[in-house]
């Protein structure tokens, strides 16, 4: 697969699929510009070559033309982040749009309107993809966060650039990071999986059994495993229909010589609230009326030891309800252990919406090797799936 480094964009217009699906506040101000910042190296490479850029992205999940999701709300942030003037066009494929794009000069940057205002984008319409293809000379996909979608702008469009398509620098970094964890990482390799439900991580767990040395399971999903082994989990979250599966996964870990670590103690609460009464309990003996909302000190100590001795680390999912300050200690402690391990030379990849939010909230995003920009795309990569946006390149 070619990258932007394989092309000279002198006097060429790059049609770049970026992922500017950024969070906005109630007044449509950008809350986090990470995804815009992540695309900056690719855009500047093209501009520095003497080329021009046409940026296309989605924002949210609008139903038709909903101006609440217009990219006009973010275009000033795009200008500020890139440090360059940006032309906003409230359309993607019309004649007026093409007229503007045909007159682009080297160094100019255009941001087109939200792709998802068009049903043809989501439906992967070939005719729509062909119209989009008229907007540039070389197609660049730098939208890892949308690479798992078989949409017109992420996969179908590549067919119209048989010899002039490539990945951006961000997309390439994402692929390299996942490859490093799953296939080329130095051992021991440790995967830390958290979150509420084991059902959302089944495919990942099954795919990484032959690739990792240890799996640490925390968060809400852990209680299904504890109940499966006869533990009393009180009012803690549990997927009763996944109990047999949990036992199977425990056996599969043994068969593959993978060390599977589960919490031994928890910080429990008498209601799902930051102000709830709380106490530390053994995870196999949580009283009725109490629910585990974080891992306890013994679990933190055991998990941290495994993490600090790792050479390659994947973190996907928090250890508890970290959004509540009183139940955030376990997630932060795991982040701190990953920081130490990274400082000692380990490679650490953090991905998945909640994990990324956690490392940012605790100021650890600069202390790990790589923070992925793609939630669903990263999960599908870890599941072993081929992403349509990458296959198209």
Image (cartoon, helix red, strand yellow):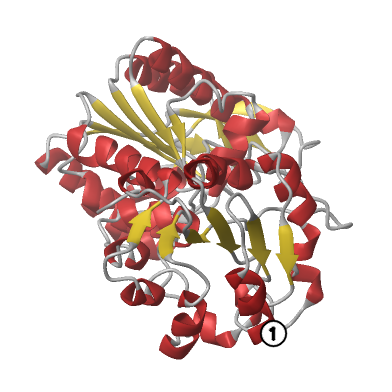
Check the image and name the residue furthest to the bottom.
127
Q: Is residue 124 visible?
A: no
Tell me where residue 119 appears, x and y as whole percent.
58, 86
Q: Residues within 10 Å of mark 1 (few under 14, many from 20)?
A: few
Tell me where residue 240 appears, x and y as whole percent.
43, 61
Q: How many marks?
A: 1
**Label 1 residue SS:** loop
* Quarter placement of the N terminus: bottom left
Q: Which residue: 44% across, 21% down?
A: 338
Q: Is residue 318 visible?
A: yes
Q: Which residue: 44% across, 12% down?
A: 340
Viewer-closest of 152 and 313 = 152
- Vertical comparison of 111 with 284: above or below: below
Tell me where residue 2 appears, x and y as whole percent.
28, 52
Which picture quadrant has residue 332?
Answer: top right
In-image side of 34 versus 208 (left or right)? right
Viewer-closest of 26 and 328 = 26
* Quarter placement of the C terminus: bottom left
């Amino acid at each position: 697969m070619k990258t932007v480094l394989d092309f000279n964009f002198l006097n060429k217009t790059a049609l770049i699929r970026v992922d500017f699906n950024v969070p906005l506040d109630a007044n449509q101000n950008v809350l986090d510009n990470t995804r815009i910042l992540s695309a900056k190296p690719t855009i500047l490479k093209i501009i520095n070559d003497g080329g021009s850029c046409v940026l296309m992205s989605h924002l949210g999940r609008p139903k038709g033309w909903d101006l609440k999701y217009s990219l006009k709300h973010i275009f000033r942030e795009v200008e500020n982040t890139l440090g360059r003037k940006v032309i906003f066009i409230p359309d993607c494929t019309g004649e007026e749009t093409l007229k503007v794009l045909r007159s682009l000069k080297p160094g100019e940057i255009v941001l087109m309107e939200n792709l998802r205002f068009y049903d043809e984008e989501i439906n992967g319409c070939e005719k729509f993809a062909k119209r989009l293809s008229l907007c540039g000379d070389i197609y660049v996909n730098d939208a890892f966060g949308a690479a798992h979608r078989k949409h017109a702008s992420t996969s179908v469009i590549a067919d119209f650039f048989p010899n002039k398509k490539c990945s951006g620098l961000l997309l390439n970094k994402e692929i390299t990071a996942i490859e490093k964890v799953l296939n080329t990482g130095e051992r021991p390799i440790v995967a830390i999986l958290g979150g509420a439900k084991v059902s959302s991580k089944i495919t990942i767990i099954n795919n990484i059994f032959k690739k990792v040395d240890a799996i640490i399971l925390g968060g809400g999903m852990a209680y299904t495993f504890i109940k499966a082994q006869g533990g009393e989990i009180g009012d803690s979250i549990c997927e009763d229909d996944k109990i047999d599966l949990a036992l199977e996964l425990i056996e599969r870990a043994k068969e593959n010589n993978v060390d599977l670590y589960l919490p031994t103690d928890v910080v429990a609460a008498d209601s799902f609230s930051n102000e709830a009464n709380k106490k530390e309990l053994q995870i196999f003996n949580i009283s009725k009326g109490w629910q585990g909302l974080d891992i306890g000190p013994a679990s933190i100590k055991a998990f941290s030891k495994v993490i600090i001795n790792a050479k390659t680390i994947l973190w996907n999912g928090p250890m508890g309800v970290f959004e509540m300050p009183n139940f955030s200690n376990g997630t932060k402690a795991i982040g701190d252990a990953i920081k130490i391990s990274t400082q000692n030379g380990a490679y650490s990849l953090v991905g998945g919406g909640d994990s990324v939010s956690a490392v940012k909230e605790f100021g650890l995003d600069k202390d790990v090797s790589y923070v992925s920009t793609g939630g669903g795309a990263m999960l599908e990569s870890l599941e072993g799936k081929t992403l349509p946006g990458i296959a198209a390149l």
